[in-house]
Amino acid sequence: MNANNTYVFHEDAGHGWLAVKRKELLELNIIKEVSVCSFEKGDTVYLEEDCDAALFIRAMEAKGSKIKYRESVHPDLSPIRRYAGFKLRMSEKYA
């Protein structure tokens, strides 16, 4: 898990996303529950604020971990909107 449980919450005028490493979603065993409303780039998944970020926060709290976040505000549209939509990888479907 993230050593200090501090994450970046990205937001623009219309929406927000919590940046989380894909590995953490696997470790929490919630990766199969992440919706197609989230995005990904490299090994980071940008969890959509309404459902997926809340799913992650609940899973962390269930393990006894509180998360902290810092905000990254984009005055216009966030570049996250141009990232690939989240998809399970073949190996994750059977994990």
Image (cartoon, rainbow, N blue to C red):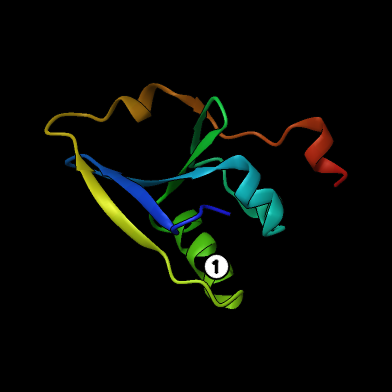
Q: Residue 34: x and y, percent?
A: 60, 49
Q: Is residue 40 left or right of residue 7?
A: right
Asked if 42 appears above or below 12 in the picture, the reply is above
Residue ID at (16%, 41%): 13
Q: Which residue is mark 1?
A: 60
Residue ID at (44%, 71%): 66
Q: Residue 11: x and y, percent?
A: 25, 43
Q: How many numbered discs sit on the rendered protein?
A: 1
To which quarter of the image does residue 23 belong?
top right
Looking at numbered disc 1 in the image, what kind of residue is underneath it?
A: Met
To which quarter of the image does residue 81 belong?
top left
Q: Residue 5: x and y, percent?
A: 45, 59
Residue ID at (67%, 59%): 28
Q: Residue 95: x and y, percent?
A: 85, 47
Q: Nearer the viewer, residue 49 or 70?
A: 70
Outermost residue to the front: 3
Q: Nearer the viewer, residue 95 or 24?
A: 24
To which quarter of the image does residue 67 belong?
bottom left
Residue ID at (38%, 22%): 82
Q: Secondary structure at mark 1?
A: helix
Q: Is residue 13 left or right of residue 51?
A: left
